[in-house]
Amino acid sequence: MKQVNDHQEECLNILQEECAEVIQAASKIKRFGLIGKPVNTTKTNRESLEMELGDVLALVDLVKAAGLGVTEEGIERARIDKMQRLSRFMHTWSQTLEIK
């Protein structure tokens, strides 16, 4: 028996695709810099990363609404936990970041 319905599966598939596009955008910044522009586009690498992060945030909203049991509260708890772990283990952590 299928564990998710067709809509949920579609949301998860698109979320996976968008996450992969974030990885690609981050890689391009590492290789070519923030202001580099890939051939055939007018967007800088920074603008591409912003767009892809926005796409992921949109899919997070769709996943929350898709009936998978993913909640804003659960996501926020996980975000705070991650920020706390990063503050302890990330070598370049900025002390100016506040964990909200």
Image (tube, rainbow, N blue to C red):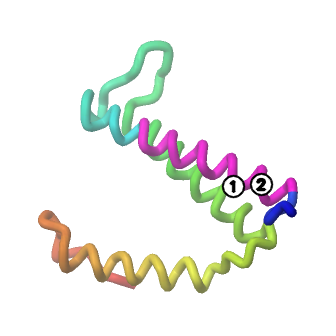
Residue range in magenta is: 6-24
Name which residue lies at 43% across and 14% down: 39
Point out the residue furthest to the front here. Answer: 1
Q: Mark number for residue 12? A: 1
Decide whether the magenta segment is chiefly helix, strand or loop.
helix
Q: Quadrant location of residue 44?
A: top left
- Residue 82 vertical placement versus 17 (above, below): below
User: At which x and y percent is residue 34?
Assistant: 29, 36
Quadrant for the N terminus in the image: bottom right
The stretch drawn in magenta includes residue 84: no
Q: Nearer the viewer, residue 42 or 61?
A: 61
Tell me how far mark 1 sits from mark 2, CA to CA: 5 Å
Measuring from the top left, give residue 50's x and y in whole percent.
Answer: 47, 46
Q: Is residue 67 above or below residue 8?
A: below
For residue 57, side relative to residue 67 (left or right)? left
Q: Secondary structure at mark 1?
A: helix
From the image, tell me which residue sits under label 2: 9
Mark 1 vs 2: CB contact within 8 A: yes
Badge 2 amino acid: Glu
